Amino acid sequence: MIVDAHVHLFPDRLAEAIRRWFSDHAWEIRYRIGVTEAVRTLREGGVGRMVALPYAHKPGMARALNDFTLVISREHPEIVPCCTVFPGEEGAEEILEEALAGPFAGVKIHSHVMRVAPDDERLDPVFRACARHQKPLVIHCGREPASEGYGIDVRAISGAARLRRALARHPDTICIVPHLGWDEPAEFEAMLDEFEHLYLDTTMAIAGWFPGGPDPEMLRRRPDRILYGTDFPNLPYEWSRELDVVRALRLPASDEARVLGGTAARLFGIA
């Protein structure tokens, strides 16, 4: 079974606002589609499960986003729901506890969008909750893709060194870093030896869209610590481009199976 471990599915109005932001500050999103069509597109392409990663860009959004994600996961069994919380918001620990004690498979945090560094103390409750429930924290904390549209110097609040400090405080937290840690892939890969519960995902890192991205050969070196993910539907190119790269590597069958779904299924509790 192929598991796309990095998909973004939002309510229609919020999805349209995200598309406008991308048009202004990043790239033109190719797939301007709703949840049902997004699920159908991946399903028809052979993806059996898709991990939905909502993220809140301001306080007070998390509960509604989590409720939405749970609803669509019940409508579409292919969707594996994760939750989010805005670090430091009122009731953050209660939001996390309710979600992770229930059906949510993990937590999504985006350092750029939330303007919070991975070693910021406001994230300590998130690390602790994920460790307590043994559910992954998916945290975009690499320095790229950077944009002035976030309204903050994202390079200053991101990076391998800042995540290392956070994981030194929370070594039992299962942590997944998207984009193979681009633009510090070597540093993030080296951290895999330091922290046994750290993983990376391939999202937009090996498709050749960004110049000078991580070497896809990392998948050959670390097949047990890398998950396949796409960022679908917020892509400027054909969604299957990354899947084609993974298959073109011609990894041993057991390694390809782990990258394309086995490790994700284990970490997110996918049957």
Image (cartoon, grey):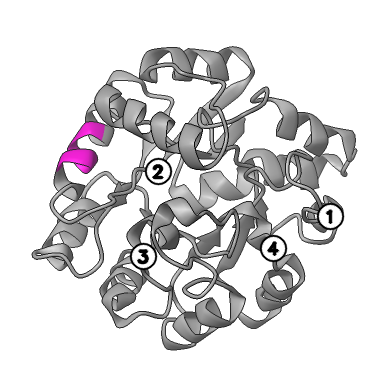
State the residue position of label 2. Answer: 53
Circle 2: is it few (<14), some (14-19), or many (20+) Cα within 10 Å? many
Q: Earlier in the sequence, mark 4 or mark 2?
A: 2
Residue drawn at x 76%, y 44% is: 206
Nearer to us: label 2 or label 3: 3
Image-based side of 186 in relation to 1, left or right:
right
- Say whether residue 271 is visible: no
Label 1 near label 4: C-beta < 8 Å? no
State the residue position of label 3. Answer: 115
Nearer to us: label 4 or label 1: 4
How far apart, in angstroms, are the residues tagged by discs 2 and 3?
17 Å
How far apart, in angstroms, are the residues tagged by discs 4 and 3?
18 Å
Q: Secondary structure at mark 2?
A: loop
Q: Is residue 67 magenta?
A: yes
State the residue position of label 4. Answer: 183
Which percent across, then down, holds residue 32? 46, 18
Numbered circle sitting on residue 93: none
Residue 26 sits above or below residue 20 on the image: below
How far apart, in angstroms, are the residues tagged by discs 2 and 1?
25 Å
Residue 188 sits above or below residue 138 on the image: below
Label 3 near label 4: C-beta < 8 Å? no
State the residue position of label 1. Answer: 215
How far apart, in angstroms, are the residues tagged by discs 4 and 2?
22 Å
Quadrant holding the N terminus: top right
- The span shown in magenta is 64-68
Which percent across, then down, holds residue 126? 30, 68
